[in-house]
Image (cartoon, coloured by chain):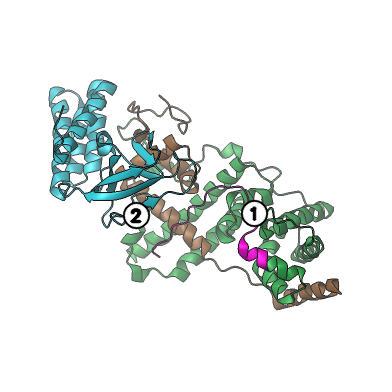
Chain colours: A green, B brown, C cyan
Amino acid sequence: MDGYRREATSTTAPPIPPDERLLLERLRAGDEAAYRELLRQYTPSMLRVAMMYVPTRAIAEDVVGETWLGVLKGLDRFEGRSSLKTWIFRILTNTAKTRGQREGRSVPFSSLGGDDETDESPVDADRFIGDGHRWAGHWASAPRNPRDVPEERLLAGEATERISAAIEELPESQRAVITLRDVDGFDAEEAREILGISDGNQRVLLHRARAKVRAALEDYLNEKVSA
Amino acid sequence: MRWPWRRRAEVGPVLSRPEDITCREIVRIVNDYVEGVLPAAEREAVELHLNLCDGCSDYLEQLRMSIALTGELPPDALSPELEEELCAAFRSYRE
Amino acid sequence: MTAYKFLRSGGVGPFTGFVWQPGTWVEAPGAAPCELGVHACRLDDLPFWTNDELWEVELDGAVVEAGHKLVAPRGRLTRRVDAWTTAAAQSLADEAAARARAHADANPRDDTARAYAEDAERRAGQGKAYAATYIASVAAEHAGGAAGRDAERRAQAEWFRHLLGTSAS
């Protein structure tokens, strides 16, 4: 588990990357293999995003089908000022929102209910030294260094299972953001556009979600040390 | 002098410098640090503190590790049935 | 211009994990020099960044002062400061802890001052130079306010000046 640094920076959606440009040409030429490639790459994430807006999987599949049709119809008009991926997901989000409203489901992020949690600390208050002490606010019970856990005791499969379980337990809006950002690899700008939320909201939701996932990892590491 | 991450006065020593940021405050803003969206002054405060504090360095290591592990979660596969359905639509559109 | 840089063992950037190759120019990406760029520091700011290895660096391009750092679009490691050894770091830590102890001794009824001195001595005993120097600066502020704090950091910078063999003013 070395060398795992991924520090995303928030940027605006970049224009179409070179490898997508080739794919686009092949698509316009009617190359089914190129289409299949694109389908496989994006459909699973598209289904996940659609599920945030519509009530059933079947309807989500409908939405995805409609989206791909929209992509095909719009291929000739697409100017490449954003990436193909961003463009596809914009069509998806619009299609999903419209369908979701028709199905009577309210947009999940219309009320985040996040502002009342501004003072929530991702870590229990009693992990820190209390007020009045000369080191108030510093760790009373510090996290352990992951490298202190003997490598052979860590099973990557186990750790990811715990992380997966932690994500499943997140409130919907936090789950959506962390999935788009850290599972699907969208950057901050793409994620907030897909979800239709502000930059600040995206950051807060991601912060809370990642904090909970970290806590789950910490529990796992602590178990493995005492194993 | 109060720094932006301090929401209310914390009872204790009056310490006036950015490097006096506490672990409790670090934990609140560390994700913004990882995201690269902290203003320069706050970013420096975080770095000065990380130099000082094993606990927060380890917290950051855990956070980075959990982000990396989240990235390793297997993507859902596209079911063959759905794939064929979508490809059939492609073919009929092309006709 | 010449500046300094602390790295972790193995020439590793403490915050980026970037592995520096001595002598090789490093270009920093991005157009915002305060956020990105090669980071280094002046001699006076060395106490703020102490780490395993100390290097002299050459910076190129428009150098920006940002807080306790210098930021430049290009830089390279030029010379390892061999004098910065574990023993040297220990002496820095011990001297800082001694100053914290002096504050406590000067104020025998001040429990907090004594606690800071014990904290600094404990950290120095663990070989944690950065923590010891930080605690000493906090102890100095407790004893003498902001001016006291600045004086302590200046004393630490003077220690580095001595290490580097620069004549003191």
Q: Quadrant of residue A88?
A: bottom right
Residue A144's tag is 2
Q: Choose between A225 and C142: the one closer to the eye.
A: C142
Residue at position x 59%, y 51% from top? Answer: A174
Kindly tell me whether residue A40 is visible in this rendering.
yes
Q: CA distance from mark 2 to mark 1?
A: 42 Å
**Residue C62: within the magenta?**
no
Labels 2, 1: front one: 1
Instruction: Provide the secondary structure element on which disc 1 rests.
Output: loop
Q: Is residue C158 left or right of residue B14?
A: left
Residue identifier under label 1: A15
Q: Position of residue C168 (x, y in %)?
A: 15, 30
Residue at position x 50%, y 48% from top? Answer: B35
Look at the image and give the residue range highlighted in magenta.
Answer: A1-22
Q: How many circles with numbers are drawn on the protein? A: 2
Going from N to C along the chain, the mark reached first, 2 or 1, is 1
Amino acid type of the residue tagged 2 in the rendering: Arg
Instruction: Provide the secondary structure element on which disc 2 rests.
Output: loop
Q: Position of residue A151 (x, y in %)?
A: 34, 68
Q: Is residue A88 left or right of residue C168?
A: right
Q: Position of residue A4 (x, y in %)?
A: 43, 60
